[in-house]
Amino acid sequence: MHHLVIGEGQIGRAIIDRALADGDTVTVLRRSEIAPSPGIHRVAGDVLDPAAIEAAVTGADAIHACFHAAYDARIWRRDLPPRELAVLEAAAAHDVPVVFPESMYAFQGRAADLAEGAEPAPLDAKGEVRLLLLEQRRRHPARTLSLIASDLVGPTAVGTGASVASAMIIERIAAGQRPIVVGDPAAAHTLTHIPDLARAMLHGARHAARLAPNGDAVLNAPSAPARSQRELIAHASSLLGRPARRPVRVPLVVLRALSGVNTFARELSGISRLWYAPCVLRPGILTTVDGLEPTSWPDAVRASADKAASIRAGADAAPVSTSSPLSS
């Protein structure tokens, strides 16, 4: 199978690596040119450039739309709908499915126990944009699958600043710093391992007709049972050979006070229910029917901790940066 991957950040890179390991072929559409890589055909250009997206999609059997925008709801509302629409139009013209990674933002009001098929319940501007995108996919004639993930962990998340659990807890512990806890440290919080999300997206592309028989499906990505940030600190500290230091806690009142002067604080405050209350993504049909079991929580944390430690030791370069967190 030949996959078109649009965007080469934390999710796109994992999809590329898994697809190549599975024996599939890959084209990557990205805005900037980089050095060639074995087995990957790259097209430099923007999804809003008809010539670029036509060159990239020709010959593809599926599209994985992994691009994003700066972490600001105003920018999302301006940039994401037309960019996704361009991808949908290309997919429909070539009769190939599009698979999207999706966040819990549009479902924040139900995030304490999010079962597959739940009705959207956005509570902030970002959630409203995500709902708009989901509705655009549902209405469009292109076949689409949206895979809901929670906060991401995994080797390709390290160094991007796009994962709260990685950047504020795992990477800080690796650096010998106190972890920062945004939210309730005792609340259950699902983490989605990026390699599991990549495997699920490729599976979705290969079985799109069955999984989205009516043309559109919103599915839960395979994710290990939720654990707390307190447990994450203890386990990551043990793996990294560091003492489990008391975290720096960010009270919600402080986050809200900063919202008027800091964009990131404003946007994080908007999704506070995902962090200051339980945030649990329940298994869906990809796990219960198709058998895609998630990586265990300890092994997923270990993969991130090992990558963070190797970067600290200078053994690896940091991964390609992405512009915004996917999810909580």
Image (tube, helix red, strand yellow):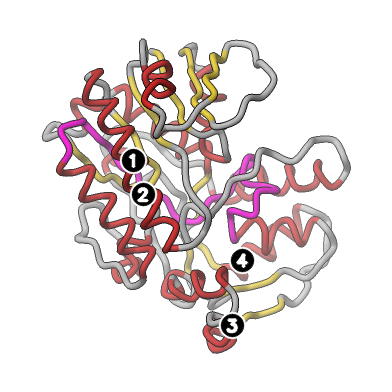
The answer to whether mark 1 and mark 3 are in CB contact below 8 A is no
Q: Residue type at mark 3?
A: Leu
The residue at which mark 4 appears reads as 231
How far apart marks 2 and 1 lie (CA) works out to 17 Å
Mark 1 vs mark 3: which is more N-terminal? 1
| Mark 4 residue element | helix
Say which mark, if any, is on residue 84.
Answer: 1
Q: Residue furthest left?
A: 214
The residue at which mark 2 appears reads as 148
Pair 2/4: label in front: 2
How far apart marks 1 and 3 lie (CA) works out to 32 Å
For the residue pair 246 and 205, the one nearer the viewer reads as 205
| Mark 1 residue element | helix
Pair 2/3: label in front: 3
| Mark 2 residue element | strand
Q: Could you classify mark 2 by the number of other residues whose Cα lies within 10 Å: few (under 14), some (14-19), or many (20 or more)?
A: many
Mark 2 vs mark 4: which is more N-terminal? 2
Q: Residue type at mark 2?
A: Ile
How far apart marks 2 and 4 lie (CA) works out to 23 Å
